[in-house]
Amino acid sequence: MSDSSNNTLSTWVEMPNHSDFTIYNLPFGVFKNKKLSPRIGIAIGDKIVDLSVLDQEGFFSTFFLPEGIFLKDSLNDLIALGKTQTRKIRERVQQLLLADNEELRDHSARGKVMVNRKEAEMLLPVKIGDYTDFYSSIEHATNVGKMFRDPENALLPNWKHLPVGYHGRASSIVVSGTPIYRPKGQFKDPNMDKPGFGPSRRLDFELEMAFITGRQTKLGDAVSTADAEEYIFGMVLFNDWSARDIQAWEYVPLGPFLGKNFGSSISPWVVTLEALEPFRVAGPTQEPEVLDYLKCEQNHSFDINLEVYIQPEGKKATKVCQSNFSYMYWNIAQQLAHHTVNGCNINVGDMMASGTISGATEDSYGSMLELSWKGTRPVKLEDGEERKFIEDGDTVTLKGFAEKDGIRVGFGEVSGKILPSK
Amino acid sequence: MSDSSNNTLSTWVEMPNHSDFTIYNLPFGVFKNKKLSPRIGIAIGDKIVDLSVLDQEGFFSTFFLPEGIFLKDSLNDLIALGKTQTRKIRERVQQLLLADNEELRDHSARGKVMVNRKEAEMLLPVKIGDYTDFYSSIEHATNVGKMFRDPENALLPNWKHLPVGYHGRASSIVVSGTPIYRPKGQFKDPNMDKPGFGPSRRLDFELEMAFITGRQTKLGDAVSTADAEEYIFGMVLFNDWSARDIQAWEYVPLGPFLGKNFGSSISPWVVTLEALEPFRVAGPTQEPEVLDYLKCEQNHSFDINLEVYIQPEGKKATKVCQSNFSYMYWNIAQQLAHHTVNGCNINVGDMMASGTISGATEDSYGSMLELSWKGTRPVKLEDGEERKFIEDGDTVTLKGFAEKDGIRVGFGEVSGKILPSK
């Protein structure tokens, strides 16, 4: 595709400064508005290319696409066509948007094809089959181990041998902008004789990214690290809301449950692996050496800047964290190879999240648990506010973007406001 | 419904001795065969009532059912009509099957309506959204605690305060009869310096039952124990295949993952809560008292006999376990109330399994882990065989039935054969 070899592409679409949605990005999403039923689009600048109208106008006439493939309320059927087709569709749209291409620019349907993003309501981009959350940041796992287990042996013995992961709840994954009710539940602080019940007192975000699978396997089959990216369609930002007090009491011996499944939020635009190609980098060195099925022939990490903002009701937003996807010890190919090595089958639209992505410095920790070190060091915000955990009325926003040699490919944001318990 | 008030119902359908599928049961399932596309039926004796043909012949003409509601490859859309409708459908079928009712018995379409079960291929009855596994048998949790943690404090502190549960993998839940490949994975026995990799050496079954939800909730809403059964459509037998060596190495701190998600098997016929009504019993006394949201006004347990058989390739089957669903410490209403108390939303077709159902005696333990006490006491089988865990070629079959005052309501069976690793 032209965007990895040529970094001087320009488009006839007006491009705001620092837009995440450049001609190099072209992520897929699902949207509707007052006039339009749910449909699939590609973001560019402040606009959305309505793929269903492009299709009706014959711009994909040589593609042999199933009828109405873009008039869907999820990307699943489109993704299921396979990467050959989705790559071609994205490349065709890129071609149509180039400054000197007059096909769409001067077409009478241009006004109908180009929808204002401001007027669109973004929907959950995929129907999520199964959702898995990994725990792949060594800094995060070490911080948590120091706080809750043994500071001298913060990492558990299995951690450097396999990408630890667990199953999460798919039904409660919502799109950016959906408010989240503070969960109620049981907790038992060290000073309590017996468990109490009520709204969580230690509500947290987790800065994560997630990939979406684009191809299914059969029960019994495994995907190698070499093939893994052929099964991954793209990525989104992921906020794994967590209730630390509920989680601490419930999680032994079978893992987190109600402390997590009250809601997770994702960004609406799915950035393809093709768009991330220019930002491919090596991950951290893995020592001790991993088992054969986890070895990689190429780099599977990406240099993606990540940020977290907290905005109390009626106040200014403060950036509280700055991290990077490339800090992750385990990469996406290793995660998928591990997930399937036992024959576990995957479907189109499964979501696999990274786990909290923390860095080495204190301003790069991806959760309030770490930023406030278990509530012992309040985080200062603008307007004189401070936070140990997230309060009612707070809006938490994650942002992510890659930038190199004048090319910017961003994820937009995932944002969610905490409402008081119902 | 007539079956709880009258225990002398008889049907014109030939009824084999000890059939699970009596006129009192009438479970729903999805089937197809060489001639028939997937469709919904109700089991009776050795027959299946093809509901799609009944519908076409006008037997539900006053029900205002959506067109083609029985010509589906899952029960989801039917269940989503609500319990008022599904109860009416089941009652209508019961009426039509009564010995003295001539409507169907003497109808020209009778031959088309009544399909031989032997000639039908049963499909997975529901499209499973999310799958949750609980850990609700006190005997099982105590046995595991004794083996792996502290024999003096076998139960963890949270166990009697909440129904411990975790999320599992929905994609790998298969219908009875589907073979399961022995999973490969990492393990690290106490005598090993570093982890090894290969086919699991400690493959196990888990005797469980699962309920299927029939009504959705919105994110943020909770279901009370009093309302819980209105959200539960019915139940199936559930074999939660487990690789103990993989599980032991991976499960800290986030719970079981690849040790479980290579496959779970369910019985194809969904027995409704209405059919189980005559078998409602009190569960074990809960002490200490549970928190308010877990208190129950009525009994939510059922007296269901459970059995496990192991049949090595080419040998006889041996019954290795005899347990009962009513042994469960936490009941289904408490499980659902707990699952949603934090606002986690549920959908039609979610599956929630009980966890291994063990009793107090050694012959009632619901897994090889417990029956062979971690492999230290081989279990004797017929034909001179013995087993510590499950071997390649073994078929494991779970059976379940309730019986009282001449009424029998059974689940049939869930069976699965272990194939060598791929």
Image (cartoon, coloured by chain):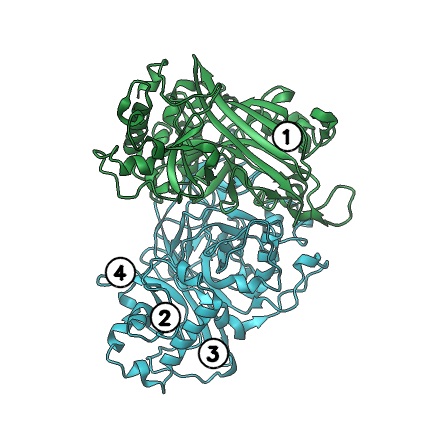
Chain colours: A green, B cyan
Tell me whether the residue at label 1 lies in contact with that at label 4, contact meaning CB atoms closer than 8 angstroms.
no
Marks 1/2 same chain: no
Q: Please name which of the two marks, 1 or 2, marks the residue nearer to the observer.
A: 1
Q: CA distance from mark 1 to mark 4?
A: 54 Å
Question: In the picture, residue A15 is in which quadrant?
Answer: top left
List x then y, in percent, for residue A148. Answer: 67, 33
The earlier-in-sequence mark between 2 and 4 is 4
Hey, which residue is sitting farthest front in the picture? A108
- The mark that comes first in sequence, 3 or 4, is 4
Residue B398, percent from left and from top: 43, 61
- The residue wearing badge 1 is A310
User: Which one is in front, B227 or A352?
Assistant: B227
Q: Chain of mark 2?
A: B
Residue that mark 3 sits on: B407
Q: Is residue B123 above or below residue A98?
A: below
Residue type, label 4 = Ser
Q: Are marks 2 and 4 on the same chain?
A: yes
Q: Which percent across, then down, holds residue B68?
A: 32, 63
Report if residue B350 is visible in the image: yes
Chain ID of residue with mark 3: B
Q: Residue at x 61, y 38 (%)?
A: A417
The chain letter under disc 1 is: A
How busy is the neighbourhood of tag 4: few (under 14 within 10 Å), some, or many (20 plus)? few
User: In front of the other: label 2 or label 3?
Assistant: 2
Secondary structure at numbered mark 1: strand
Q: What residue is pinned by disc 2?
A: B43
Q: Which residue is mark 4?
A: B37
